[in-house]
Image (cartoon, rainbow, N blue to C red):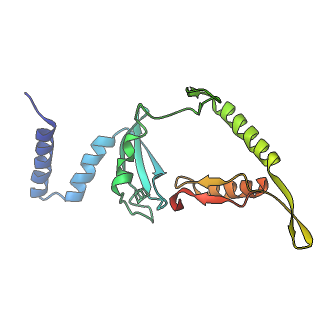
Amino acid sequence: MDLSRRDLLKAVGGAGLAMTALGLDAKEVKAATADFRIKGAQEYTSICTFCSCGCSMLCHVKDGKLINLEGDPDHIINEGALCSKGASMGVIPNSDQRVKTPLYRAPGSKKWQPITWDEALDKVAAKIKQTRDDNWIATEKDGDKEYRVNRTDAISFLGGAQNHNEECYLMTKMSRMIGTDFVEHQARV
Ligand code: SF4
C-alpha cells in the first residue's frame, strides 16, 4: 500500500480526534503521542543561540542524533514557546555542513585546514599576547600631569546570546585582566 506522509498525518490526526471523541483528554492524547516519538531518548535542556532573549529548549537525543526540539515549558523566559528562528535550530546539530573543528587559513593561503582545539588555543593566545605587547599604553597625559592607565585599545571582546552568566563573568574578568575596556554583545551590534 502506498501511503504518503500527508496520508499518514491525516490518519494519525483522525485517530487523535477519535480518541478525544471517546472522552479522552486531548492533552493526555498529545502527551502520549509525544512519548512514542521520544521514547528511549535522552532529554537535555539548552538555550537558543540566535538572539539575546535566552529562550530555553528541551532537546531529545537518540543514538547521537537530535530527534526532537521544543520550547521548555518550565522556563521562566519563554514558557514553552519558541519563535520561528529558535524552532528551526533543530536542523543545525544534525547537519553534515556543521563545522566541528577549528579551521585555520595560513597567511597567503586560499585553503582552510582543520586544526585541533589545542592548536587553535595556542594560536589565539600567541596573537593576543603579541597584540597586547605591541599596543600597550602604560601612561596617558592630561595637561601637565601623566597618569598610569595600563591598557590596550587594540583588543575587544565580543560575546553572544549563547554565553551564559558564568561565561560572561569570566569573559569580563579576562578582558579587564588583559587591559581592554571594549566588551560588546552580538545582539547590540
Ligand atoms: S527562540 Fe527566538 S526569541 Fe527565543 S532566543 Fe531564540 S531567536 Fe530569540
Q: Position of residue 156 (x, y in %)?
A: 67, 54
Q: Position of residue 145 (x, y in %)?
A: 92, 72
Please state which of residues 54 and 184 is positioned toward the viewer in this rendering.
184
Please state which of residues 136 and 7 is positioned toward the viewer in this rendering.
136
Residue farthest front in this picture: 143
What residue lies at 63% left-to-right and 28% top-to-bottom? 108
Q: Position of residue 82 (x, y in %)?
A: 36, 57
What residue lies at 66% left-to-right and 34% top-to-bottom? 120
For ligand 1, which image quadrant applies?
bottom left
Please state which of residues 110 and 172 is positioned toward the viewer in this rendering.
110
State whether residue 137 is above or below residue 3.
Answer: below
What residue lies at 82% left-to-right and 46% top-to-bottom? 133
Residue farthest left in this picture: 1
Q: Image check: 137 left or right of 160?
A: right
Q: Position of residue 102 (x, y in %)?
A: 58, 33
State whether residue 137 is above or below residue 89.
Answer: below
How many numbered callouts? 0
- Quadrant in which the N terminus appears: top left
Please state which of residues 9 and 48 is positioned toward the viewer in this rendering.
48
Q: Which image quadrant is residue 7 in?
A: top left
